[in-house]
Amino acid sequence: VTVSIGTDKTVLAVLRHLVEHGPLSRPDLGSGAGFARATTSAIVNDLMRSGLVAEIAAPRPAGTRGARGRPVTLLDLDDTRYAVTGLEIGADRVLAAVYSLRGRELLRIERPADVEAVNPRALLRRAATVLHEALDVVSEDSRRLLGVGVSVAGLVDASSGTIKYAPSLGWRDVALQAGVTEALGDRAPVLIDNNANFAALAERRQRLRDGVDAGSLVYLTGTYGISAGIVTAGRLWRGERSLAGEVGHLILEADGRKCVCGRRGCFETRAGLSAIVADALGGAAGRGRSRRDPATLTAGLNEIVSLAQAGDAGVVEALAEAGRWIGRGAALVCSILDPRVVVLGGDYARLAPWLLAPAREAFQDSLLMPETETQQLEVSVLGPWAPAEGAALAVLLSIVDGDRELPA
Ligand SMILES: [Zn+2]
């Protein structure tokens, strides 16, 4: 039985509250979503019939009244009937991951794609193959697919489904949503956005589910470039022209290094992954001058991680210096947006053992109101899978936000 939930704001509000705060008791769900008990009860019954919500048994919390050991019944998203899929298209890899509604990973497939990157058509074909492979598993599992979210690094116009500019891929004006939709042959609805926005959504939900307040959160991608995913009051802030969050070109240094954008002293020239890799390898004591530069950023990253692990003083100091720039950049972001938490994502998470302490120190030094316990610089809890997980989550959010109907 499918319930039409697409137009009923009350139903959507109850569902959204559960997406963010579940599992909850019936009374807590009602009061949290702001509805009377009878209203909530009727809605929950509908949502249970539609397979979106399920009752789960949870241990009775210590110190509460009731029979010892007897579980209480809570409500949460139904984890068994539906699936959402995230696809991340990167310069050197394509990955697809399938999740349950509660964000439990059911499947992940990762394939290298460096040869295809220059050509949108070839990379799309590679992405479609990976996606079909993932969707075949969903059908075998007899789950219903709610949709596919597609993540790319770069300037994405989510409303028109186009990539305006993706520097790491060298793409301009690519109609990605239409391309993936066509490649999928109507197997599932498709939505697209950039990796920072998707990752911010995923990191926020993970924190909510861990019981941590993250009403406002900024996610910084530490990849080829630096962009920010901004969540405020539980929603993404994209800006008027989908250009919000392009923090990589904030100017941190007067007369600094030349940037790819043609100006000098941008955040990215110090803390973008290519700058970090070049600086760290340039400072490496344990690396002969005769060796060639790494073929890809990933290869360079692998090399500096192993040199840092081996204690190479030059590499460790270069990473500390990059960390200080990250801290200064993050403080600048905070002076404008004042979020609860700034999350260092992408490859920053991998470099965190060497970056994080210096970044936090510089962050505190650069804040106008430092030493506050309520504002923190943290490392991604989801690691490199945050964009794909967020892309899948965004499919669910597009339904609970009333942007799309539950597929029949
Ligand atoms: Zn720049």
Image (spheres, rainbow, N blue to C red):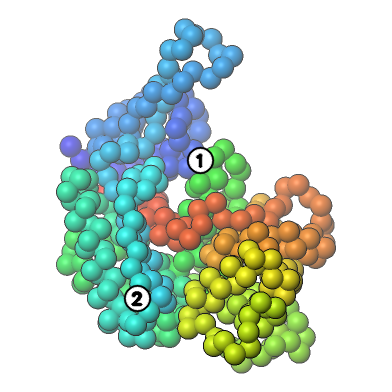
> Could you tell me how far apart the alpha carbons at marks 2 and 1 are, in whole angstroms?
34 Å
Q: Is residue 191 above or below residue 256?
A: above
Residue 209 marker: 1
Residue 233 point in image, percent of width and height = 57, 51
Q: Quadrant of residue 326?
A: bottom right
Residue 113 marker: 2
Element class at badge 1: helix
Q: Residue at x 54, y 77 (%)?
A: 300
Tell whether 174 sits left or right of 198: left
Element class at badge 2: loop
Tell whether 158 sits left or right of 357: left
Q: Quadrant of residue 292?
A: bottom right
State whether residue 244 appears in this view. no
Residue 246 point in image, percent of width and height = 57, 74
- Look at label 2 and name its amino acid: Ala
Tell whether 83 sits left or right of 341: left
- Look at label 1 and name its amino acid: Arg
